[in-house]
Image (spheres, grey):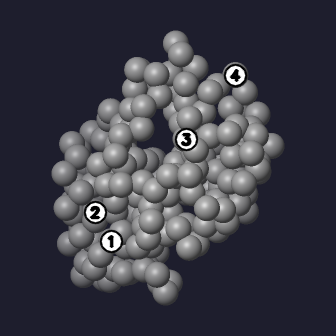
Amino acid sequence: MYRLTTFSVGPYDNNVYVLSDPKSKEALLIDAANDAPRIIKELDGLRVSHILTTHGHADHVQALKAVRERTRARFTCHEADESMMPIAPDQRVRDGERFRFGDYEVIAWHTPGHTPGSVCFVSAERVFSGDTLFPGGPGNTANPYASFPTIIDSIRLKLFTLPDETEVLPGHGKPTTIGRERPHLDEWIERGW
């Protein structure tokens, strides 16, 4: 199994995820959120090919420029969130695109709703959900870019196709599982968000 390093940074306790192949030392970084020196320290000894971004809100990309300059990794985001980014992407993420690191890979799933270009990354028995899905419900849709019906469709039609045991690693806070969240979909729809 690949190595997963998780830590929280910044005033909004953003989760940063480093996925690495212990054998080749190849790695991916998900969300260069804040505290570039901390992120760079965690990447020491690894060859990071891509900085994958779950969406364009500022709290998820504040360390992006500094980390990209230091690692020379390719910054990737979905085209629909490109205008929110502090720098131009090296690559636009497409739904279903695969990103390899050594013997492992993650698959990008476009999951709009929190923002038009929100992306989740699926790898083995985990999904890195950004702000699309948290323990207890979908991410916030009370912003000009968001849509509650769209995020519900992304969760129902994409994330909830994963097995119950799939670990959900969100952009903030503690992990959950698909099985723990799936039974509550109708409650979320009923109360709106």
Q: CA distance from mark 1 to mark 2?
A: 6 Å
Q: Specify which label sits upstream in the sequence, 2 or 4.
A: 4
At 58% from the left and 72% from the top, the residue drawn is: 84
Q: Quadrant of the N terminus?
A: top left
**Which mark is first along the chain, 3 or 1?**
3
Q: Is residue 100 left or right of residue 63?
A: left
Kindly report the distance in space between the C-alpha atoms of the residues bearing marks 2 and 4: 36 Å
Residue 137 place in picture, x, y as percent: 37, 66
Residue 151, label in figure: 1
Q: Which residue is mark 3?
A: 50
- Can residue 150 be seen? yes
Where in the figure is residue 156, as x and y percent of width and height? Answer: 21, 63
What's under tag 3, amino acid-wise?
Answer: His
> CA separation, marks 4 and 1?
37 Å
Residue 93 image-quadrant placement: bottom left
Taking depth in this image into account, of 167 and 29 the one nearest to the observer is 29
Q: Is residue 186 left or right of residue 150?
A: left
Q: Earlier in the sequence, mark 3 or mark 2?
A: 3
Residue at the disc numbered 2: 155
Disc 1 marks which amino acid? Ile
Secondary structure found at label 2: helix
What's the CA distance linking mark 3 and mark 4? 15 Å
Whole-Å distance between the Cαs marked 3 and 2? 25 Å
Q: What residue is shown at x 47% (from left), y 28% (from top)?
A: 101
**Residue 35 appears at what percent x and percent y?**
76, 51
- Cβ atoms under marks 1 and 2 closer than 8 Å: yes
- Dot 3 falls on a residue whose secondary structure is strand
Q: Nearer the viewer, residue 116 or 134?
A: 116
Q: Which mark is residue 39?
A: none
**Left/right of residue 104 with respect to residue 57 in the rendered view:** left
From the image, state whether disc 3 or disc 4 is nearer to you.
3
